[in-house]
Image: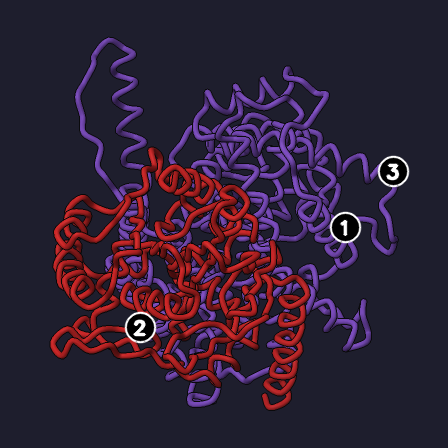
Amino acid sequence: MIFNSLDFAIFLPIVFAIYWFFLKGKTKSQNILLLFASYIFYGWWDYRFLTLIVFSTLVDYTIGISLSKTSVQSKRKVLLWISILVNLGFLGFFKYYNFFLENFVDAFTFLGYPINSNSLNIILPVGISFYTFQTLSYTIDVYKNRLAPCKRFIEFAAFVSFFPQLVAGPIERATNLLPQFYKKRVFNSLAAREGLRQILWGLFKKVVIADNCAEYANIIFNNSAEYSGVTLFVGALMFTFQIYCDFSGYSDIAIGTSKLFGFKLMRNFAYPYFSRDIAEFWRRWHISLSTWFRDYLYIPLGGSRGGIWIKIRNTFIIFIVSGFWHGANWTFIVWGALNAIYFLPLLLTNNNRKNLDSIAQGKILPSLNEFTSILITFGFTVLAWVFFRAKDMSSAISYLTNMFTGDFSNVTIDIPIQLTLFILFLFFIEWINRERNFGISKLEKIIPFTSGRWVLYTFLVLSILFFAGEEQEFIYFQF
Amino acid sequence: MKNFILRLFIFLIIALVSVEIYIRMNHLTIDIPQRTINDQGIQAYKSNQTGYWSKGAHTWQINAEGWPGKLPQSMNHLITLIGDSHIENFMNPNECNLGTILNNEEMRYNFLEVGRSGATFIEYLEISKYLYSKYNPELQFVFVKESDFSESLLQRGRRQDVTQVNLKERKIIDGELKNPALKKFLYSIKTLYFFRSALDIDILKLPFRKGNQTKSIKEDKVREDAQKLLEYVASSYDTKNILFFLHPETREEIVDVFDQFNLQHYKFNAKNNLKWRNSKNDVAHWNCFGFQEAAKQIINLIN
């Protein structure tokens, strides 16, 4: 089931009504409902996927319990490795099997030892990368004694499969989300209103901007040889807006939906395109994944401590793994490596934590210096997205080559003026509200009159209904 | 909670009203003409109506006689053009209507379009009888698609709003206006109709159905139905001044049935059927090009 569908529009109010009207105050029953609803939500794609998530849940639940029963370090380590191998084994098989096989065959062929192999027709279960990382964080945290193991299966299963964030995050830490399943949840009108606002904003970003931009990004990327250099630049820009609005829109809907049920998920995006350098960009983009890699990979590897070579090694590892997490394609690996290259100079000159404060704090506009930094960072990001979007490496290189060598005098595709205005509107609203959680968060502070706010909400509703692009699946579902 | 639900409810009402206003201002849905049944049981539209096609692309008109399009200058040397939504042709501007094209191109005759969404094959014949008594036309052209046969037969299921024939009793069963008040109400709420179209939900059996949705009867059954129906038509109607124009995608075995009962017919010749179609999947309706090509063939035939 996808968020921008009629199915979900019917599903959500039903679950909400049962949750608050019939099961109010009954935490255990609410958890059972959430689990049941989550399995329906996930099984809507393909009920066979459920076996995988149930198995993964059973394994990690059992390992969590077993970890609590033993203090022998070697045994605990074995248990941890079982969890890691099972989870990454599934991920590796479903997501990376064909990639490794093809590259293995190519490598042997290149060395003069051609081998025959048959790739498998594997369907990638939706959201496997997300829930795998979520359950892994649980086992690692229990192993490291940061978290007491969950002894209640329903709560644990509901945590693993919590439908708002199951298929595309935010990738929640067990330490944040799991305890919320134990607590009694009381309906909070303010939080629910904020949740609805966030859903509305997320839908606007996804349906109006991302889906419309996708149309042009797809045309230009799929026929890049036919377009002028400046048009290719427009295509890259369209994808830059698409991926941001698609993914952050999904996150907004997920976080907003959770608020309706009394849950608080972590923030996943913090206006990344207003970043003044790449380090800041990575603190603002897909925060739940970046911090996951930071906590469970970068820091255990030694982080930025140690010599210069250790720093360089760790930076490349984390960015390349992050790229590879997105998909089994060299383009993602290069995208990760490119970001590592962008990031390294900042790290090596100790400038990676220079921009921790809010952009243009207390001012209406950024300074010229800040504005230039934002533009440069944005430009680097746009170039990197070309690798992310291209179907293979040769397409990416040819796209970039044509982008800089092709005709720069005219754009050979018509981008509707409405779309341009919607994009400007989005960034205008996000700029105004950049010190809050999302574009129209706590709107009372900016528009004190209810009628004024409702005009804005109505405008968003009308835009969603009448300016929606052709329905596209959320990009991050494929990861 | 009460406060939250109340605010949400009020907002939803405001949003719905805004949506309705927006849809009306931009004519995003098709305006649907009201129908009536005359004293001879013929279902037509209420006269002198006009409305917008989807997205305000153009307007449609119902003339003083209750049929779509403009009336010819006179009813002398008249040829009638009878069909369903295909001839009604609301989806194209009036200048693309077959009657308009023929009236402009072939001056020796006057052409009267008589089209109504959802009309069945047997209804075409009933209409032709009625038109004959009213205008005494020189010729009557009936436009036929394969899907028209089965829906004419009561044995295939009663459709309350269209005329059908009970072949066992050899009796015509006139259509009735189905829930006119409810339809009027539903069609007047444009938001409902808009979402019905956008989400492809069948709130009522609406007149503007997609061409491929009527194709639920299997192809071998269509031939069987055509056989039974045309046998009844040949024996029950005076068809000597009727010429049946068959859709270019009509199968030869159906054409053979027309031959079998000596019914005069002409199958349109379209080298590239897709070019005639109003949209890729819409077998039943043509675009301007399709009507212009059809008109050329009709004029050649008349000459």
- Horizontal side, residue B122 vs residue B201: left or right: left
Say whether disc 2 or disc 3 marks the residue closer to the N-terminus: 2
Q: Which residue is mark 2?
A: A153
- Quarter where residue A408 is shown: top right
Q: x, y (%) of residue A328?
A: 38, 35
Q: Residue A130: x, y in percent? A: 42, 53
Callout 3: SS: helix
Above-or-below relation of A174 to A368:
below
- Determine which residue is flagged by label 3: A368
Neighbourhood count class around disc 2 (C-alpha, 10 Å): few under 14, some 14–19, many 20 upward: few
- Is any part of residue A439 visible from this angle? yes
Q: Nearer the viewer, residue B149 or B11?
A: B149
Mark before the other along the chain sequence, 3 or 1: 1
Q: Nearer the viewer, mark 2 or mark 3?
A: 3
Closer mark to the observer between disc 3 and disc 1: 3
Q: Secondary structure at mark 1?
A: loop
